[in-house]
Image (cartoon, rainbow, N blue to C red):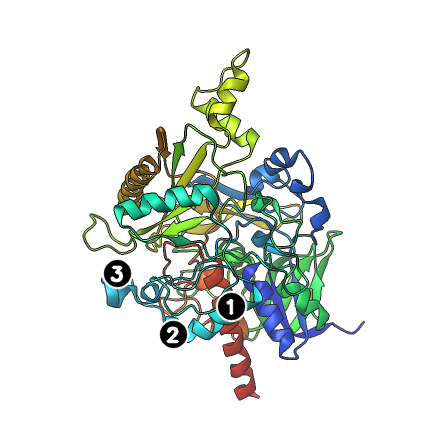
Amino acid sequence: MKKQEYDYIVVGAGAAGAATAWRLVDKGFSVALLDRGKEMDPQHYPSTGSNWELRKQTDFNPVSAVRNLPSDYPIDDSNSPIAVCNFNAIGGSTILFSGHFPRFLKRDFNLKTMDGLHEDWPIEYDNLIPYFELNEKEMSVSGLVGDPMYPEIESLLPPVPIGHAGTKIAEAFNQHNWHWWPSYSAISTRERNGRAACINLGPCNTGCPQGAKSSVDVTYIAKAKKKGLTVFPECAVSSVIVENKQAKGVKYFDSEGKLQALYSRRTILAASAIGTPQILLNSEAENGSKGIANSSGLVGRNLMIHPLGYTEGLFENEIDVDIGPQGCLIYSLEHYRNPNEQFQLGYMMHVLRGTGPVEASKSAFSRRKLRFGANLTEDFQRFYKKQLSISIICDDLPNPDNRVQLSDKKDRFGIPGVMIKYRVSDNTQKMMNHGMTQAKKILKSAGASKTYAFGPVRNSGWHLMGTCKMGTNSKNSVVNEMGECHDVSGLFITDSSCFVSGSCVNPANTIQTLALYLTDKIVEFDEHAA
C-alpha cells in the first residue's frame, strides 16, 4: 500500500488550525487537517431545543472533565484555581466561544520596550495589520469604526445592537468619563457569504444554529473544503514522526482506535496552548526519550490563562439582557496599562448580558435569595432579566512555573492527558480586586440596587496562551519568528502556544491573525528553500 503524503499536515481544527489550513489550500497546496473531535451539526445544537441550559451543563459543558465525551482527553487542573475550558470538534473552541473579537493592541507586542516587563515579541503589530484585516473580513466581524483604542480599523459590519441594557451601562461609563465601545464581534449582522444574519437568539456559547456566529467550521473550513482540503475528524494525534531531526508527519488513532501514520513535507501543530505541548511532550525523540523540540525546557511552560473577576448588578426592573449575544455588548479599556494604578499591566471591563432562567435561578439559590415553596416565583422574578454583569479580564505575565505537563491519566487510546499547574499572581489579584471595585461603581451608576463580585472565576479558562514561546534565541524559546521549532526542522506551530506575552483582551482574533501571518512565512520559506 502506497503511503499517503500531503504537502502539509495541520493538527487541530480550531481557530488557528482552520485559518492555517485555508490559507495553504488557497495557495494551491494539498493539506490534511486532523482533529480529535467530530464534525458538528448545527441542527442539533442545544439552543434548537428547550433543554439548552441542561445540555450546556452536560455534553456542551466547556470543562472536559464534566463533558467527558469520547473526543476529550484528561485535563487535571486541580492544581489551578481556574479550570481549562475547551471543545474538541471540527471548529474547535470557536463552536462555543461567545464571539467577542477585539485585536491585541500595538503596545502588547512591545512589553519590554514600553513597560519594562518580560520581553518583546520578535514581530511587530504593524506586521500583522494586513492579516487582521484579512481575518476580520473572513470572519465577518461586526463593530463600530472610530474606537480611539483602534483608530486603524476602517471596515466592519454594523455592530450588534447594544439595546436598552447597553445604553444604560454606556451612560454610566460616560458619567465617569471612561472609555467604552460596542464589542467587536465575530458575528454576521448582515447576510454574508451564504450565512444568515444574527437574529439575537442569545446563547451563542452553545453553538449557533443560525450560522451567524463565525465559528471556523462555517467560515475557514467550509471555504477550504471547496478548494480541496481533506478533513480527518475523530482522529487523535498522539505524536510527531521525527527522522534525522526533521518532522515527517504524525501518528494518530482513528475513530476505531487503530494507530495510523500520515506523512507530509511539513507538519504544523495548532492544537491549542494545551494540546500542542501535549503532543510535543508525548512525541518520541530519535534517541528514544520522550519529548521533542524542548532543548530550551520551555515546552509547556509560561502558560497564561486570563484570570477573570465577575461583578454583577441586580436591577429593580427588567432590562433586555435576554436579547442578543451574551458576550458581545460593550467593553472598556479605561484600565489598560494605566501607570497610576498600584499594579502592573491592566484589565478589560467586558460587559455581558444576562443568563438563561436556569442559570439565573442557580445564581439566586447560591446567594440564598431563592426560596422553594410559595415564594419561588416571586424570588425568581427578582433576578431573571434583571442581571447585568461586568467581567474583569486580567492580563497575566508569563511565569515558567505556570505550565502544562503530561499526566498519568490516559485517554481511551492510551495517550497521556495533561496536568495544569497555575497560580494567580499577587499582581493579578490586585488588578482583579481593583477591577471588581470599579465595575461595582459602574453598575451602581447604571442604577443597580445591589452588586455582587467574586474572582477568580473557576470555569473561565478559555484564553490559553504561551506554552511554546516564540523567539530568536533557541535557548529561551521553542519556535523562531516564523513558527518553526528550533530543534526540529519542518515542524511548525501556528497557534497561541507561540505567544510571547498576552493582553487583557480576548485572543481569538489575534490567534487567527498570527496563524495567517505565520502560514505565509512558512510558504515563503518553502519557496526559497526550493
2 or 1: tag closer to the N-terminus: 2
Marks 2/3: CA–CA distance: 21 Å
340 horizontally vs 269: left or right = left
The residue carrying pointer 2 sits among few (fewer than 14), some (14 to 19) or many (20 or more) residues within 10 Å by Cα, namely: few
Q: Is residue 64 above or below residue 378?
A: below
1 or 3: tag closer to the N-terminus: 3
Q: Is residue 49 above or below residue 32?
A: above
Type of the residue with mark 2: Asp
Q: Quadrant of residue 3?
A: bottom right
How far across and how far down the image is residue 191, in percent? 63, 60
471 horizontally vs 178: left or right = right
- Quadrant in which the N terminus appears: bottom right
Type of the residue with mark 1: Ala
Q: Which residue lies most toward the top here?
A: 374
Q: Which residue is mark 1?
A: 515
Q: Which residue is mark 3?
A: 117
Q: Is 206 or 517 nearer to us in this picture?
A: 206
How far across and how far down the image is residue 202, in percent? 57, 43
491 horizontally vs 350: left or right = right
Marks 1/3: CA–CA distance: 25 Å
Q: Secondary structure at mark 3?
A: loop
Camera sees residue 44 = yes
- The answer to whether the residues at label 2 and label 1 have Cβ atoms under 8 Å apart is no
